[in-house]
Every structure is written in C-alpha cells, then in structure tokens.
Image (cartoon, helix red, strand yellow):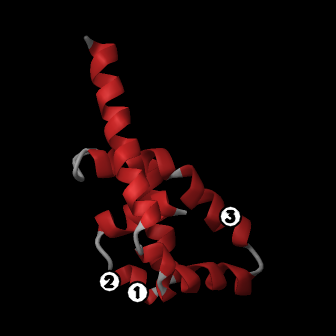
Amino acid sequence: MIRFSASIVLAGVFALAVPCAQASSFAGTSAGAGYASSGATSGSTSGNDKVVLQARQDAAGFVASDGRIRGARLEAALRALREGSAEAQAASDMELARAILAR
C-alpha cells in the first residue's frame, strides 16, 4: 500500500511539473534573468545555481503537497533566489518552487 501511495505522489509531481514547463512561468520573467545575472556579476554562478538545482526534489514535494512539505534544500534555494532578485522577493514560495521546477 505504501508503494502504491508513493507512485501516486510521484505521478502527481510529474503531472504538476509538465504544465509548469509548458506555461509561462516565473522563471521566464525578468526575475529569473535578474537572478542569473546577479550570480554572473559576482563571478560565482555555479554556487547559487547548484543550490537551486539541488532543490528540485524538495520543490516538487512542496508543490505536490500544496505547500505542506518544506525541505531544507528548498528553503536554501528560496533564500538564494530572493537575495538575487527584487522580483523574487515579492513572489510567493509556491511561485518560486514552480519556477525551480521549470528550470
């Protein structure tokens, strides 16, 4: 029964990720570009990008659980995104988590 439930959760995560990748998302806005360029000016894009990319699994769990599951990697990525972009500071955690999944 546990295996069946995990399969349903994973199917839901993938179902949510597909529309996010197809639709216009936060990642495609100037905030996504601002975040990427802020790391480029400091000469360290790999550090922040790595934090965000490592948060994909946590972001998927967050989105699939409608915000009830919050992982440490997602929290670190949300901080990194908000430090790098004023627009990201105004975005909700759910918007940012979906943007992470759309990357």
Q: Position of residue 58 (x, y in %)?
A: 42, 46
| Sequence-wise first label, 2 or 3 | 3
Distance, label 2 to label 3, CA atoms, is 23 Å
Which mark's residue is nearer the viewer, 1 or 3? 1
Q: Secondary structure at mark 1?
A: helix
Asked whether residue 20 is in view, the answer is yes
Secondary structure beneath label 3: helix
State the mark number for residue 47.
Answer: 3
Identity, as a three-letter code, of the amino acid under mark 1: Glu
Instruction: Please rate how many residues cluster around mark 1, counting C-alpha atoms within 10 Å: few if below 14, some from 14 to 19, many from 20.
Output: some
Position of residue 101 measured from the top left corner of the image (x, y, whole percent): 47, 57
Position of the C terminus, as image quadrant, is: bottom right
Q: Amino acid at mark 2?
A: Ala
Residue 70 is at least partly visible in this image: no
80 lies left or right of 6: right
**Disc sitting over residue 87 in the figure:** 1
Residue 93 locus on image (x, y percent): 31, 66
Residue 53 picture quarter = bottom right
Mark number displayed over residue 90: 2
The answer to which of 27 and 47 lies nearer the viewer is 27
Quarter of the image with the N terminus is top left
User: Which amino acid, mark 3?
Assistant: Gly
Q: CA distance from mark 1 to mark 3?
A: 20 Å
> Mark 2 touching mark 3, by CB under 8 A?
no
Q: Of all residues shown, which one is farthest toward the top? A: 1
